[in-house]
Amino acid sequence: MSDDSMLEIIAEQERTLRFASVSVDDLVSIGNEIVSAVKAKGAFAYVMIRINGFEVFSQAIGGASANNRCWAVRKANIAELNQKSSMRVAIENRKKGRGLADMGLSGSEYALEGGAFPVLLPSGIGIGSIAVSGMPSAEDHQTVCSVIASHLGCAVPSII
């Protein structure tokens, strides 16, 4: 799939996957659903959900390591900073030939990889993120989006 096609799909996901209301219980439920989805794939990953800088869910699945947690944090940081999915930010910057240094960001704190999706209100304001790290970048991203869509009772197109 081309970068342009992926960007169109991701923009639609970001417009659709918004929370009219969200509670810690909702986010824990989403976290558990992501864990189930990753296990169903026979994969390993680290799942982390943050709201307003507060970690409300985290779990290592299978062979996930501390490195996967570090990647999840770095992906979440980029999603929260930009109020866009980390996959979208990665593709947009790749298309411009820009890296983290060009954005004034440190690779020890941020990552231009897919897998973190912002928790968006209907206005488009981001209040946190849902991050997965362990599978290929596009699969991390799509797993998060598919679970959010299921939780919200809607459908979104897939990038994989």
Image: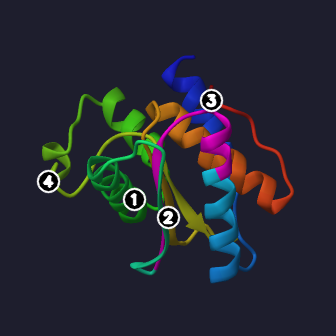
Circle 4 packing at 10 Å, graded few (<14), some (14-19), many (20+), is few
Residue 13 in sight: no
Image quarter where the C terminus lies is: top right
Q: In what quadrant of the picture does the N terminus appear?
A: top right
Query: Mark 2 or 4 closer to N-term?
Result: 4
* Residue pictured at 70% horizontal, 75% vertical: 26
Contact flag, marks 2 and 1 (Cβ < 8 Å): yes
Q: Residue furthest top?
A: 1
Q: Is residue 20 above or below residue 69?
A: below
Above or below for 68 versus 26: above
> Dot 4: what SS?
loop
Instruction: Specify the segment rendered in magenta.
Output: 36-51
Q: Quadrant of residue 69?
A: bottom left
Q: Which mark is residue 76?
A: 1
Residue located beneath label 2 in the image = 129
Mark number displayed over residue 159 = 3
Spatial CA distance of label 2 from label 1 is 6 Å
Q: Residue at 71% of width from left, 45% of height from top?
A: 146
Q: Position of residue 105 (x, y in %)?
A: 17, 54
Q: Which amino acid, by three-letter code, is at mark 4?
A: Ser
Which amino acid lies under the numbered mark 1 shown in the image of this protein? Ala
The reply to whether the magenta stretch includes residue 13 is no
Report how far apart the C-alphas of labels 3 and 4 lie in the structure: 27 Å
Give the distance between the C-alpha atoms of the residues marked 1 and 3, in whole angstroms. 19 Å
